[in-house]
Amino acid sequence: MAEKTTKKTMKREREGSPMRTVSLHHFHDTENSQSLDVSCSEVMQEEYGLYVWPCSVVLAEYIWQNRQRFVGSRVIELGAGTALPGVVAAKVGASVVLTDREDQPQVFENMQKTCDLNQITCEMQRLTWGQWNDKAFALRHPGQVVLGADVLYASKDFDDLLATVKFLLLGMPDSVFITTYQPRSGHRSIEYLMAKWGLQCTQLLDAADFLPASKLSALSNSVELVEVKSHN
Ligand SMILES: C[S@@+](CC[C@H](N)C(=O)[O-])C[C@H]1O[C@@H](n2cnc3c(N)ncnc32)[C@H](O)[C@@H]1O
């Protein structure tokens, strides 16, 4: 396996109030002498979607390490927030749709800043879990990778999230949902809900299995990654 080094630095800049931060995320593969730097705009406000959560650092690293899989693929990120995984997927060659809940205009403004910082174009769509409209139907595609970092954090929303995941995967051959979460969310309830929604876990990894040491040491809690497909 390639040795990977990681560096995360933060650059703060005041643009009036609230304070914006740009975090820098480094991805490296010494074996192939390849690297990638991604900048994420963050806003110091009490809104979950305005800063980078550890689960998205883990999911972004997984995408980087498995980047061949994402070249030319179609990706949709749920509850994207600052969108680090989606941006990495776009950078390695995926066509990406970034989504978040529809009552969060500031999250979308911030996402656009991140896309601009990284000189990428991503489609953005308001998508609240458990709610459907015509635009949501257009998001269903075979062979699509659905991403979600730290979207299993509030148990009251688990059913709505998994209903949306099921909606996106049902009848779509080879589409999968890849998500990272902190086990605080409750393993048993997630397993129970997956079975309830006809979803099946096909891979389970601990962040410690693949995260470079420098990124692992920055995690204060364990993070797990699961890949999920629909029974039909
Ligand atoms: C803990 S944050 C994670 C953000 C980002 N994925 C990360 O890991 O940095 C949860 C994200 O889910 C979004 N979210 C929460 N409830 C939602 C809902 N019902 N429908 C759609 N998005 C939702 C929030 O706006 C936020 O961006």
Image (tube, rainbow, N blue to C red):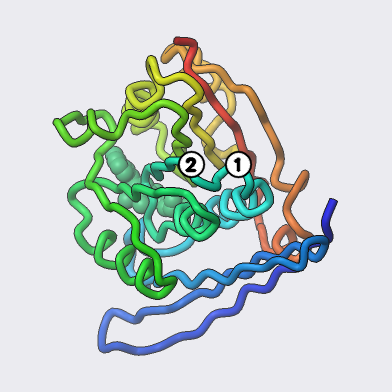
Q: Residues within 10 Å of mark 2 (few under 14, many from 20)?
A: some
The numbered disc on residue 69 is 1
Residue 22 spot, x, y in % from top left? 45, 77
Look at the numbered disc 2 and say if its residue's Cβ is closer than 8 Å to ligand 1: no
Q: Position of residue 189 (x, y in %)?
A: 51, 22
Name which residue lies at 57% across and 22% down.
Answer: 188
Instruction: Give the residue type at disc 1.
Output: Arg
Q: Quadrant of residue 60?
A: bottom right
The reply to whether residue 187 is visible in this rendering is: yes
Question: Eyeballing the image, is 41 above or below 193?
Answer: below
User: Which corner quadrant holds the C terminus?
Assistant: top left
- In screen coordinates, is 10 left or right of 30? left
Q: Relative to 16, does residue 232 appear above or below in the rendering? A: above
Q: Position of residue 14 (x, y in %)?
A: 35, 89
Q: Are marks 1 and 2 in contact (CB under 8 Å)?
A: yes
Q: Secondary structure at mark 2?
A: loop
Residue 48 in view, yes or no: no
Number of numbered discs present?
2
Furthest residue toward left: 134
SS assignment at label 1: helix
Of 43 and 125, which appears nearest the observer? 125
For the residue marked with disc 2, what is the amino acid? Answer: Ser
Numbered circle sitting on residue 73: 2
The residue under the point 39% across, 51% down is: 80
| x 55%, y 56%: residue | 92
Image coordinates of residue 94 in percent, x first then y, are: 47, 49
